[in-house]
Image: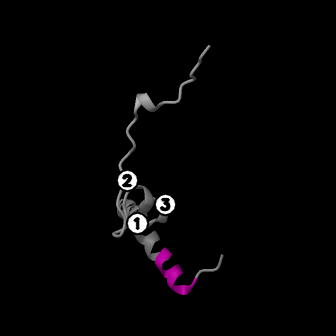
Amino acid sequence: MELTSEEQCLIAEFRKLSPSVRDELLAYAASLLRRSGPEASTETESAPNQCRLKEAEQRPETEKTPFFTE
């Protein structure tokens, strides 16, 4: 895997950080990924032009049960 010089500089700067600052930076990056990720956006957030569907309520009277006649 080849990295650009900019990517190599970022990695070098990241390695210079203290462990607590690294953890904080990684947690922030993870939160950004969760907010902007395609799979996360469909689960937690909705697009501005969409609305959330209400969860279907369970109705025992509509359950399919076998109906026996003689």
Taking the view exactly as shown, the residue that stands out farthest to the right is 1
Q: Can residue 8 be found in the magenta stretch?
A: yes
What residue appears at the point 40 percent right and 33 percent down from the top-left corner?
59
The percent position of residue 70, horizontal first and vertical second, equals 62, 13
Q: Is residue 51 above or below residue 13?
A: above
Residue that label 2 marks: 53
Q: Comparing marks 2 and 1, which lies closer to the viewer? A: 2
Report x, y in % for residue 12.
48, 76
Please state which amino acid type lies under the numbered disc 3: Glu
- How far from the left and from the top, in percent, is residue 4? 57, 84
The region drawn magenta spans 4-11
Quarter of the N terminus within the rendering: bottom right
Left or right: 38, with 48 as reference point: right
- From the image, tell me which residue sits under label 3: 39
Q: Secondary structure at mark 3?
A: helix
- The percent coordinates of residue 9 (x first, y second) are 49, 81
Residue drawn at x 46%, y 70% as measured from the top left: 15
In the image, residue 39 lies in the stretch drawn in magenta: no
Residue under circle 1? 29
Figure quadrant of residue 51: bottom left
Separation of residues labelled 2 and 1 (CA atoms): 30 Å
